Amino acid sequence: MSKKEQKASAPKLEHFFEDVYAVVRLIPPGRVSSYGAIARYLGRSGSARMVGWALNGALQLPDVPAQRVVNRQGRLTGKIHFGSPTRMQELLEAEGVAVQDDQVVNFAALHWDPEQELSAE
DNA sequence: TAGTTGACCCCGC
DNA sequence: CGCGGGGCCAACT
């Protein structure tokens, strides 16, 4: 650090990552969430890419079930980051989530929206 | 320092 | 109904 490190002091960004982890941890077993839903819940609607980027660092966190986070179509787009082509699918099936052709079965019913579940009680 | 990429999503043709 | 482009913000090279 030296002169003008305005972005160096950005706890807001760190909070964003931590916030993503917190929401993912709140996802109940047997349920799945989506990047857009989480991004919108955090107020970053449209920046769903950042959610995936944050989850990329969440892979090292055993408390953050990143396998429960899929895209809007319920497709396991992030499975390629799990090191194994079927790792994410097996993890979901182990939790009771049926996955077929890299896609969550009955995704609409299993979709867990933080803004809806956490706000609308 | 600047350019490119990315676990996405939405709109237009 | 399939394909392409734009937008978003941060990290990597």
Image (cartoon, coloured by chain):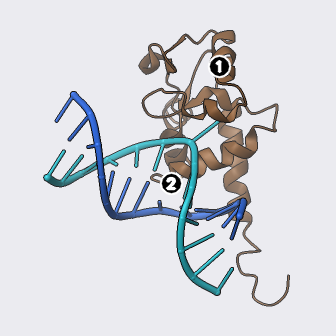
Chain colours: A brown, B cyan, C blue
Amino acid at circle 1: Thr
Q: CA distance from mark 1 to mark 2?
A: 27 Å
Chain at tag 1: A
Q: x, y (%) of residue C8?
A: 47, 62
Amino acid at circle 2: Ser
Task: Count the marks.
Answer: 2
Q: Are marks 1 and 2 in contact (CB under 8 Å)?
A: no
Structural crowding at the residue carrying mark 2, measured as other residues with C-alpha within 10 Å and reported as few (<14), some (14–19) or many (≥20): some
Q: Which residue is mark 1?
A: A86
Residue nearer the viewer, A12 or A119:
A12
Residue at (70%, 51%) from the top-left corner? A17
Q: Is residue A26 visible?
A: no
Q: Are marks 1 and 2 on the same chain?
A: yes
Task: Choose the circle earlier in sequence order: 1 or 2.
Answer: 2
**Under tag 2, what secondary structure?**
loop
Q: x, y (%) of residue C2?
A: 26, 33
**Under tag 1, what secondary structure?**
loop
Q: x, y (%) of residue A45?
A: 47, 51
